[in-house]
Image: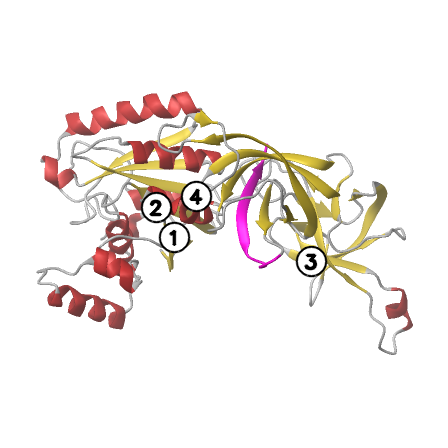
């Protein structure tokens, strides 16, 4: 019986996770091995990978081809874009993001990490903890990923040395403690031969902990680890004007996606930014009414009172409101090829609300290699900086540490309509 068949019968729902690390640490090979050993690769895909590997003169299938899909990546043998893969173990569904390792692709990693609930940071066992390892650990921490797995790869190239593994673990613990990173787990492995990924193998018998897949299977689901405040950004106000039912003429439903928390019929709520108070009259989906709705459900809410609500407003719990503000301080990753110009105005989109914004100050730019704070007058692509924005219209926000949905926003260039920045509110 295989290791995957021995796992307990659980269903923890969807897990989004990220793989990152220094260049050539084996991120793409790890994902390929994970999908290959869990029998999640289609036959025709496997055949195509085998043919490509044979043309390259390789004796075995190059599993990294599964994620290195761009032609430029295949020619260079590196990952330069975010490659997403979807698979199921039979007990859980997964979305994997393979982020690039080069410093100049920081924006790609930020994009991949923004929705991840777990990060796998690969370390080459021959090289130990490098500056890029620290950079990716910092970015994962900055982006609020609650669970970190340090995968110490290529153990087969150091003769499966337990002493070298423990030395790397100690180095990483010292660094992560200084950053305040909480949940960190360590796994020795060889992505090339498959040790400690899905199957345990026979060459790391001194390691008694779980395999990588066992850690993934048992990681708590998003929104399940602590009580969250109810946040419901309104996407659309439904006012039917047709039909023979006279009740439809008075129908006023507020449609959207619950970003966090839960809501039940009868609960008291506030509508922001107006601060008007009401209670939930009904919760509806396309085909039914619900007594209770939870995070990530798309629903229509009906209120007991006639309250003026528009797209971009937010319905929150009356006992746990969000901050309504015209100024935000945020860590911003600049994504645009054109540098940020502090003299220009930009459009900020946070949940379903848009507002024009001016740059009030750039407090500092983070040197992503040394993690030192540097003065800055503008931001280039891939720069990360602490920026203060002054807003034309109020936003309803939480800190990113408290709520990754209402604490995040994107910056849009009004002239081109391109997304040029991503921000995390402090």
Relative to 88, does residue 372 appear above or below in the rendering?
Answer: above
Element type where label 3 sits in the image: strand
Measured as percent of width and height from the top left, residue 191 is found at 21, 47
Q: Distance between the residues labelled 2 and 4?
A: 19 Å
Q: Kindly check if marks 3 and 1 are in contact, taking CB atoms under 8 A apart as contact.
A: no
Q: Kindly check if marks 1 and 2 are in contact, taking CB atoms under 8 A apart as contact.
A: yes
Relative to 21, does residue 134 appear above or below in the rendering?
Answer: above
Residue density around tag 1, few if under 14, some if 14–19, many if 20 or more, within 10 Å = many
Residue that mark 4 sits on: 382
Residue that mark 1 sits on: 96
Question: Residue drawn at (13%, 31%), measured in percent from left and top?
Answer: 161
Which stretch did the figure color magenta?
415-426
Q: Distance between the residues labelled 1 and 2?
A: 8 Å
Relative to 199, 60 lies left or right: left
Residue 173 placement: quadrant: top left
Residue that mark 3 sits on: 299
Mark 4 vs mark 3: which is more N-terminal? Answer: 3
Mark 2 vs mark 3: which is more N-terminal? Answer: 2
Measured as percent of width and height from the top left, residue 266 is found at 80, 46
Foreground disc of the pair 3, 1: 1
Q: Distance between the residues labelled 4 and 3?
A: 37 Å
Choose between 321 and 246: the one closer to the eye: 321
Q: Kindly check if marks 4 and 3 are in contact, taking CB atoms under 8 A apart as contact.
A: no
Residue density around tag 2, few if under 14, some if 14–19, many if 20 or more, within 10 Å = many
Residue 262 placement: quadrant: top right
Residue that mark 2 sits on: 19
Pick the quarter of the image with the C terminus: top right
Element type where label 4 sits in the image: loop
Relative to 122, does residue 36 appear above or below in the rendering?
Answer: below
Element type where label 1 sits in the image: strand
Residue density around tag 4, few if under 14, some if 14–19, many if 20 or more, within 10 Å = many
């Amino acid at each position: 019986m295989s290791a995957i068949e021995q796992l307990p019968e659980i269903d923890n729902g969807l897990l989004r996770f990220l793989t990152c690390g220094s260049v050539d640490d084996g991120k793409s090979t790890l994902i390929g091995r994970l999908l290959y050993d869990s029998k999640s690769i289609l036959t025709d895909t496997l055949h195509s990978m085998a043919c490509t590997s044979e043309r390259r003169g390789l004796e075995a299938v190059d599993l990294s081809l599964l994620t290195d899909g761009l032609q430029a990546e295949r020619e260079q043998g590196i990952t330069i874009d975010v490659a997403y893969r979807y698979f199921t173990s039979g007990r859980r569904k997964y979305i994997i993001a393979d982020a690039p390792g080069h410093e100049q692709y920081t924006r790609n990693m930020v994009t991949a990490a923004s929705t991840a609930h777990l990060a796998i940071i690969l370390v080459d066992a021959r090289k130990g903890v490098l500056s890029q390892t620290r950079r990716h650990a910092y970015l994962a921490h900055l982006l609020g990923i609650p669970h970190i797995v340090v995968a110490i790869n290529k153990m087969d190239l150091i003769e499966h040395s337990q002493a070298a593994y423990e030395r790397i673990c100690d180095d990483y613990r010292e660094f992560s403690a200084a950053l305040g990173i909480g949940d960190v787990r360590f796994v020795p492995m060889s992505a090339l031969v498959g040790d400690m990924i899905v199957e345990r193998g026979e060459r790391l018998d001194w390691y008694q902990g779980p395999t990588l897949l066992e850690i993934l299977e048992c990681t708590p689901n998003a929104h399940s680890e602590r009580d969250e405040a109810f946040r419901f950004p309104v996407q659309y106000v439904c006012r039917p004007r047709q039909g023979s039912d006279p009740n439809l003429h008075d129908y006023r439903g507020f449609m959207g996606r619950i970003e966090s928390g839960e809501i039940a019929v009868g609960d008291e709520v506030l509508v922001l930014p107006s601060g008007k108070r009401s209670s939930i009259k009904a919760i509806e989906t396309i085909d039914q009414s619900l007594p209770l709705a939870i995070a990530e459900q798309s629903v229509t809410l009906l209120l007991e009172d006639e309250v003026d609500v528009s797209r971009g407003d937010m319905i929150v719990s009356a006992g746990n409101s969000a901050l309504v503000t015209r100024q935000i301080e945020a860590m911003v990753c600049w994504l645009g090829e054109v540098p940020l110009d502090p003299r220009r105005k930009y459009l900020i989109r946070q949940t379903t609300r848009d507002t024009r914004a001016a740059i009030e100050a750039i407090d500092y730019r983070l040197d992503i290699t040394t993690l030192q704070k540097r003065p800055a007058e503008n931001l280039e692509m891939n720069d990360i900086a602490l920026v203060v924005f002054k807003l034309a219209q109020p936003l309803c926000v939480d800190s990113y540490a408290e709520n990754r949905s209402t604490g995040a926003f994107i910056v849009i260039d009004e002239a081109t309509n391109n997304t040029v920045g991503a921000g995390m509110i402090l």
